[in-house]
Image (cartoon, coloured by chain):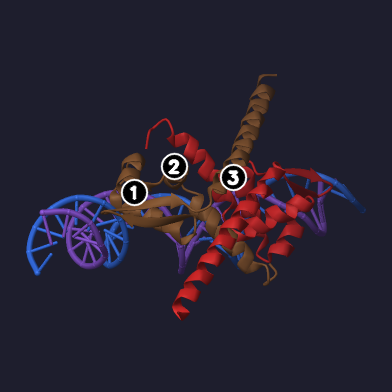
Chain colours: A brown, B red, C purple, D blue
Amino acid sequence: MKASLKPRYEARAKILKAMAHPSRLLIIEELQKQERCVNELTEMVGADTSTVSKHLTVLKSAGLVADERRANCIYYRLRCPCILDFMGCVEDVLAANADEHKKIMKGCKK
Amino acid sequence: MKASLKPRYEARAKILKAMAHPSRLLIIEELQKQERCVNELTEMVGADTSTVSKHLTVLKSAGLVADERRANCIYYRLRCPCILDFMGCVEDVLAANADEHKKIMKGCKK
DNA sequence: TTCGTATTTGGCCTAATAGCCAAATAGCTA
DNA sequence: TAGCTATTTGGCTATTAGGCCAAATACGAA
């Protein structure tokens, strides 16, 4: 690949990679509704606190979330809510996959 | 995480994961312009043919691309062109990250 | 059918990821 | 300051991903 393009694709890949995990998608979706502290998110994800903390680190270092301490909790929020617009297209792909699947099944019955 | 939500997030994560690699992003962007055969893509990516073939397998099994043989080449094309709309937001995140970075740098100078 | 080119698969190695537990840290609150 | 709770970090293990090479396969063309 052209060397000049590489950093560009790497930067984009990092962001997509940060999103590409079920627990992190859940976190993102939840944060779109409202900000949450680690404890709350841990509850929702249902994993060890340390695991969730690491997921949040991934999201943060990709620039997807920001954190802020208030009282003795650290609250996380989405930095770019447009992220969830992604999901519209992801769902389109899933729907297309489902159609495809149906077609194939239909073909089998013939 | 609620068991009922898990498959949904896993399905979405699979698609994002399929996109989350520099070479595959290059392939996707290229296929948006026009369909291409493995050889051509191999050339663009600049990796071993077998490596590119495996990347295409990943994209295909996520339902992002479709393939079709014509003459003695196999052509790949994007199945859901909306995929590239993603990139608008990814770029927004990158821009926000850059701003953040600038701010931090500015803060250091003070 | 046989050849030749395009593509995929298998094997192997290395690096990265995700998970948990235990321990360390951070910073309110008293 | 001292203690307490929330959060992060370090260490370990198991699994997955990505790369190349070599070998297998697929299929059009002769």
Q: Earlier in the sequence, mark 1 or mark 3?
A: 1
Q: Position of residue B74 (x, y in %)?
A: 76, 48
For label 1, the crowd category at 10 Å Cα-Cα, with few meaning under 14, some 14 to 19 and many 20 or more, is some
| Viewport quadrant of the N terminus of chain A | bottom right
Label 3, on which residue? A86
For label 2, the crowd category at 10 Å Cα-Cα, with few meaning under 14, some 14 to 19 and many 20 or more, is many
Q: Position of residue A97 (x, y in %)?
A: 63, 34
Quarter-of-image position of residue B93: bottom right
Task: Give me the C-alpha separation between circle 3 and circle 2.
Answer: 14 Å
Q: Please, what secondary structure does the residue beneath circle 2 have? A: helix
Look at 27% across and 53% down and name the residue there: A71
Of residue A107 and residue B110, the one placed in the foreground of this image is B110
Look at 68% across and 60% down and name the residue there: B49
| Viewport quadrant of the C terminus of chain A | top right
Task: Give me the C-alpha separation between circle 1 and circle 2.
Answer: 14 Å
Q: Earlier in the sequence, mark 1 or mark 2?
A: 2
Q: Name which residue type carries label 2.
A: Leu
Q: Please, what secondary structure does the residue beneath circle 1 have? A: strand
Disc 1 versus disc 2: nearer the observer: 1
Label 1, on which residue? A37
Of residue B56 and residue B21, the one placed in the foreground of this image is B21
Of residue D23 and residue C17, the one placed in the foreground of this image is C17
Q: Chain of mark 2?
A: A
Look at 52% across and 54% down and name the residue there: A17
Q: Are marks 3 and 2 in contact (CB under 8 Å)?
A: no
Q: Name which residue type carries label 1.
A: Cys
Q: Please, what secondary structure does the residue beneath circle 3 have? A: helix
Label 2, on which residue? A26
